[in-house]
Image: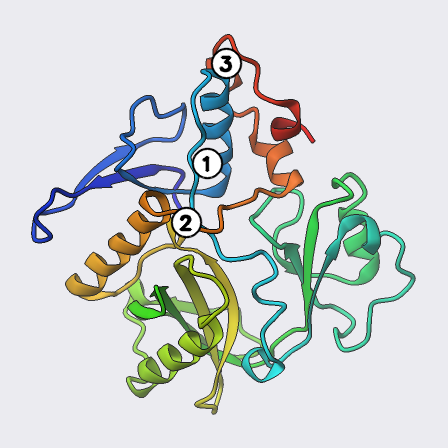
Amino acid sequence: MAEQIDSCSKGPNPQQRVILHHHHGFGPVREVGVKEAVWITPGLLIAQNAWLASQGRPSWVLSAPPTMWLDGLDRSLTGRRILTVTAGIILTWRRLPSGLGKRPWSQLAAGRVSGLPAARRTLEDLQSDLRTAPARSLIRIQAHLPSIHEEWRVIIDRDRIAASSGYCLHEGEDSRVITTVFDGAVFDPKHQTIAEGCALQAAKGRSPAPISVDLAFLRGSDRPLILEGNPVWCAAPYAYGSQGMASFLKAVAACRTDPVDPYQPDPWMLREFGGRFRSSWGPVRPDQTMVMP
């Protein structure tokens, strides 16, 4: 995702067009109304909230699915073992827990940091990458899914499908070639309804927050598996069509104008991004627990 903030506002007429205001992300956003939505990266949200705190102004509160959302799903929906634990616990392990394989995927559970990009790692590699991580940071480890062919994104808002689209095709298990929807990738049309149904099943009753659900179809299979569930306000839009894009923007707006289950940044995210706009801070020093845990 580009490092930017887009705010959108709509008048009382539901047919009125959405107005987008683009911000470059090199400094804080000075003026955003309380009724305006924001589309933003988690890192920029953290930096923006630290700046707002320095001005004595309230933070932006955005809805987000629970950090442990993926871990709570039935194995029939994920097709693999998923385990989320703190960095401190991982550093005490002598071997990986069973069911994860020798080189599972690992990443920060609630966001991204430069020190731990999503990648397949041995336990030794993972522990090396976590030496300087905050002990309380939550790390998600998951078994590798072989032979992924199609990936889809489904946006869910209030237990309804807001938008959906395939977004990339994998050429093969041993190939690094990926074709995106913007490059002309063609997806199996029957997979759209199947992906939507699976995403609805996974999201139902879990959280009232809008959620962006990523799914994968393995080669030769018509049964999708859940890859991730992320906040809608940082999800990239794909080929949703005009109505789907309008519904996507409505879901983004709901995350701020009607917030539920507020996003809670990981300590590692706070440490990396909290001081990004420090040169613009005002006279009120942000709480140190927010910026540098």
- Label 2: few (<14), some or many (≥20) within 10 Å? many
Q: Residue at x 79, y 55 (%)?
A: 125
Q: Quick one: label 2 or label 3, which is nearer the N terminus? A: 2
Where does the image place residue 254, in percent across and percent down from the top left? Answer: 32, 50
Give the secondary structure at mark 3: helix
Which image quadrant for residue 274?
Answer: top right
Residue found 7% across the figure and 48% down from its top: 13
- Of the pair 250 and 119, the residue shown nearer to us: 250
Q: Are marks 1 and 2 in contact (CB under 8 Å)?
A: yes
The kind of residue on which mark 1 rests is: Leu
Above or below — where is 140 with respect to 205? above
Viewer-closest of 204 and 45: 204
What's the distance in space between the residues labelled 2 and 3, CA to CA?
25 Å
As drawn, which residue projects farthest toward the right? 94
User: Mark 3 sits on what residue?
Assistant: 279
- Secondary structure state at the residue bearing disc 2: helix
Q: Which residue is mark 2?
A: 234
Q: Nearer the viewer, residue 27 or 73?
A: 73
Which mark identifies residue 45?
1
Left or right relative to 92: residue 163: left
